[in-house]
């Protein structure tokens, strides 16, 4: 539930303007003589408070549908791997070896190079107690960060609640906000590819008036007004940067594994994120996604294409960041709602499973393996064991990347992974 | 707040897609009881929009063959006709409850043309949902097992005795009939076996039985052990008490509140004892739920759009560009026949991003440009907001919206755009 705004000046996310200016802008003070803030003034304000260089930035990549972890980070020396999925197992010589027992899917050459540069941490066997095999429940558990009680807020949304109110702090690419960024006091903003534009003229004035906070609003009315208000804030800051919006093209058709959510154009989402970070957008957390991992049938080719997209778009994104001087600040977190069943299902696919690898990528990462590789000889009902709780990863990301105490956000969770520097 | 006005506004917007011109004021005069009974006793002669002519296009020709261009054009054309047909139906159907229920069931058995590809099986599914919209849920669920689009969507044809595939069986229990955690993982595996042996033609949606693929051994599902046909095992699922609870919960979630749970022992559950969907809806409509202020909901983009079309007497298929129309729905992330996943459409705050605020604004501007606003224009500026509240079925304008409208009330088009983008129209209070 979104609470009623308490401090209108702050709610607007405009610490950069005075209360008096805000009131003029919002039309609360009778329009009288004072001019309204123009689009250019808002844009200038955004440029006036760029994120200081050296501020860590988190980029969360959600793989929707349940990525088959066993064909991502592959136990290529284990005979049990080959016997469990004879038609789905990769031949060892086609893979990208990471160690004497694990190799990356052959399509992930970019991430392999980053691994060689010691910038990739692979946390193995990540999941949560009593794994849920439903896409929706499991994704909700991962995004709320709460396997026990059902929460209405996301783990990054609860972090947002500890931050100054500002619609620029956390941004999700795409038209619909993922639960991940929903907080109680404020939520992240949604930014569709192609950007937003500010309504102008008399209709623009009317919209500004519609967006004013009101104490008589119920929570959903308040959220409706806020969405309009954020249109003015976010688009004012973002639009000049995206002078030439990227055309929308799909990375991949989502015919085979595509009924479990997620967007289809990861490389373009990351391209927009790269432009905005380079321009100094005061954003600490970004959310992007790729769908199509629900590979119940004909998995091998579909998954390899998707993993290739993940690998290539993250690699391109990080190399774009080098030019901006911010590549040292960025940490990419890649996860999916569950792994898949060890045994293939006979449609050359796999059904919903349990744990899977989580990737942490960037200069602030100490490369290597973390957590134990789930054993193929000690399956639980045919599924991989969970060896690392995802809250270990989240706590560490909150503390080391976002510099925030994780206790209240993750109900005093104690576990950590040591993969992050700082 | 005027509670009678609130309940009547909700009766229009929740159990239907909003009032047509004159209907809201007329209902206010007639009162709540009369409005409820009118919704529950729809006209016996239901005029439907002429359905699209859809043919079985057969398998997709090879990528380089000369036929592939024609095939692709046909496929696109049929899907567009299907999309426009349903929008028109939602705007014009006099049986508003059935139409809204069809929309509900589409989000319940959420199947996307994105994977199914062909319009014909999607249309057939819609016809089934229409037929059972207010019918018997047991019969409905059994029929849905043989629905070609749903079979394709959930890999039913991949589920065989040699290699069971659990996709369909899991969603049948979790999302369609019982609700999450009301069964065990073993139940999912056993149910998958009872579902084996069916194949489907993608282009026609015709489902056929293949005995060689069938696991005919007994299965144990929710404590019952027997060799059961899909229809028998589905009847067993639907007969569970949890099924009545689940469907009542889903109706509550989509028609009353996604924020607050279904109250304990709600009469809807009992009303659904015989799995009669009409009885369940009647119980809801006659309960006090829709008069309680706390149960606000955000209109989904389709509900919002259809409401505007009904108020302004706009026929979606007559709008200048079907492609542009589809584009707006895509930007708002809600295209009929293309739910994002098998869980159906998101709710409430998910529709309230800064992006959707912008798209609603440009969408509203483009629709309203096509409307005949002569009646609004003929009214004096000061009276226009009150006229629009009745036309659109809005409970009351906030002082914020009244102030916003004051600046544009001399321009009927801009006034209307402001009204439909206001929080009190975007939200069903």
Image (cartoon, helix red, strand yellow):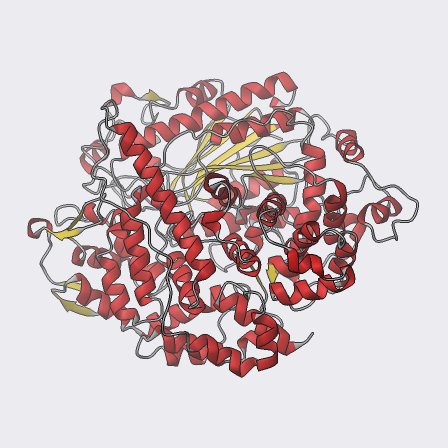
Q: Nearer the viewer, residue A138 or A417?
A: A138
Q: Is residue B258 left or right of residue A356?
A: right
Left or right placement of residue A36 versus residue B116 in this view: right
Q: Position of residue A347 (x, y in %)?
A: 20, 40
Q: Residue at x 56, y 70 (%)?
A: B23
| Residue depicted at 43% across the width and 29% down the height | A310
* Residue A194, image x, y percentages: 58, 32
The quadrant of the picture occupied by the N terminus of chain A is bottom right
Is residue A210 shown above or below B244? above
Horizontal side of A164 relative to B99 (left or right) equals right
Front in this rendered view, residue A51 or A48: A48
Left or right: where does residue A389 sit relative to residue A413? left
Residue A92: give x, y in percent of width and height: 25, 22
Query: Is B325 drawn above or below residue A39 in the view shown?
Result: below
Location of residue A387 by image quarter = top left
- Which quarter of the rendering shows the C terminus of chain A? top right
């Amino acid at each position: 539930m979104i609470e009623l705004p308490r401090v209108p000046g702050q709610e607007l996310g405009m610490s950069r303007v005075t209360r008096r200016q805000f009131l003029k802008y919002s039309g609360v003070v009778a329009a009288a003589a004072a001019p309204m803030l123009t689009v250019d003034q808002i844009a200038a304000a955004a440029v006036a408070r760029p994120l200081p260089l050296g501020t860590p930035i988190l980029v969360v990549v959600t793989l929707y549908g349940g990525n088959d972890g066993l064909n991502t980070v592959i136990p290529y020396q284990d005979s049990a791997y080959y016997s469990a999925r004879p038609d789905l197992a990769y031949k060892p010589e086609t893979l990208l070896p990471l160690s004497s027992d694990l190799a990356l899917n052959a399509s992930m050459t970019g991430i392999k190079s980053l691994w060689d540069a010691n910038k990739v941490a692979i946390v193995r066997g990540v999941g949560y107690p009593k794994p849920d095999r439903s896409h929706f429940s499991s994704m909700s558990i991962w995004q709320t960060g709460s396997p026990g009680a059902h929460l209405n807020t996301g783990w990054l949304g609860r972090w947002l609640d500890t931050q100054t109110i500002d619609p620029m702090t956390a941004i999700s690419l795409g038209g619909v906000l993922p639960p991940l960024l929903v907080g109680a006091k404020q939520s992240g903003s949604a930014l569709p590819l192609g950007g937003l534009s500010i309504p102008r003229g008399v209709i623009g004035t009317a919209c500004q008036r519609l967006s004013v906070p009101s104490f008589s609003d119920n929570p959903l009315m308040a959220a409706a007004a806020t969405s309009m208000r954020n249109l003015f804030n976010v688009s004012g800051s973002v639009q000049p940067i995206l002078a030439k919006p990227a055309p929308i093209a799909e990375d991949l058709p989502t015919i085979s594994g595509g009924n479990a959510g997620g967007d289809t154009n990861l490389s373009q989402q990351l391209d927009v994120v790269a432009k905005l970070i380079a321009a100094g957008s005061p954003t600490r957390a970004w959310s992007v996604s790729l769908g199509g991992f629900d590979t119940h049938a004909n998995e091998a080719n579909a998954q390899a294409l998707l993993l290739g997209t993940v690998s290539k778009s993250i690699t391109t994104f990080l190399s774009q960041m080098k030019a901006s001087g911010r590549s040292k600040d960025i940490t990419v977190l890649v996860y999916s709602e569950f792994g898949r069943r060890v045994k293939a299902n006979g449609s050359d696919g796999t059904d919903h499973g349990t744990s899977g690898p989580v990737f942490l990528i960037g200069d602030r990462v100490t490369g290597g393996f973390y957590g134990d590789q789930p054993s193929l000889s000690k399956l639980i009902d045919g599924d991989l064991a969970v060896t690392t709780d995802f809250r270990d990863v989240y706590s560490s990301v909150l503390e080391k990347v976002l510099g925030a105490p994780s206790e209240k956000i993750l109900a005093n969770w104690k576990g950590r992974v040591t993969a992050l520097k700082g | 707040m005027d509670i009678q006005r609130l309940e009547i506004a909700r009766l229009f917007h929740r159990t239907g897609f909003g009032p047509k011109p004159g209907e809201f004021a007329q209902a206010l005069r007639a009162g709540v009881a009369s409005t409820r009974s009118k919704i529950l006793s729809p006209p016996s002669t239901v005029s439907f929009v002429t359905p699209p002519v859809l043919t079985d296009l057969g398998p997709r020709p090879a990528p380089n063959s000369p036929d592939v261009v024609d095939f692709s054009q046909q496929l696109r054309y049929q899907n567009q006709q299907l999309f426009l047909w349903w929008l028109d139906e939602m705007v014009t159907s006099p049986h508003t409850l059935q139409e809204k229920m069809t929309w509900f069931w589409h989000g319940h058995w959420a199947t996307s043309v994105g994977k199914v590809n062909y319009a014909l099986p999607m249309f057939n599914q819609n016809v089934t949902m229409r037929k059972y919209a207010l019918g018997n849920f047991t019969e409905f669920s059994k029929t849905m097992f043989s629905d070609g689009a749903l079979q394709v969507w959930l890999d039913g044809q991949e589920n065989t005795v040699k290699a069971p595939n659990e996709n369909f069986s899991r969603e049948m229990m979790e999302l369609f009939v019982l609700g999450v955690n009301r069964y065990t993982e073993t139940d999912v595996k056993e149910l998958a076996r009872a579902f084996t042996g069916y194949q489907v033609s993608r282009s026609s949606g015709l489902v056929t039985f293949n005995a060689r693929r069938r696991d005919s051994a007994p299965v144990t599902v929710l404590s019952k052990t027997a060799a059961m046909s899909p229809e028998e095992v589905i009847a067993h699922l639907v007969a569970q008490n949890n099924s009545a609870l689940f469907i009542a919960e889903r109706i509550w979630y989509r028609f009353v509140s996604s924020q607050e749970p279904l109250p304990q022992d709600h009469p809807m559950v009992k009303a659904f004892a015989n799995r009669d969907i009409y009885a369940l809806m009647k119980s809801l409509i006659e309960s006090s739920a829709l008069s309680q202020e706390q149960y606000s909901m955000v209109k989904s983009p389709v509900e919002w759009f259809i409401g505007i079309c009904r108020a302004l007497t706009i026929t979606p298929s007559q709008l200048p560009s079907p492609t542009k129309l589809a584009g707006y729905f895509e930007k708002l992330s809600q295209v009929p026949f293309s739910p994002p996943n098998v869980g159906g459409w998101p709710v409430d705050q998910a529709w309230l991003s800064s992006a959707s605020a912008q798209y609603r604004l440009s969408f509203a501007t483009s629709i309203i440009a096509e409307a005949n606003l002569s009646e609004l224009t003929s009214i004096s500026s000061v009276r226009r907001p009150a006229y629009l509240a009745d036309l659109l079925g809005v409970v009351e304008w906030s002082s914020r919206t009244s102030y916003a409208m004051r600046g544009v009330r001399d321009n009927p088009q801009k006034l209307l755009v402001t009204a439909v983008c206001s929080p009190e129209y975007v939200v069903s209070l």
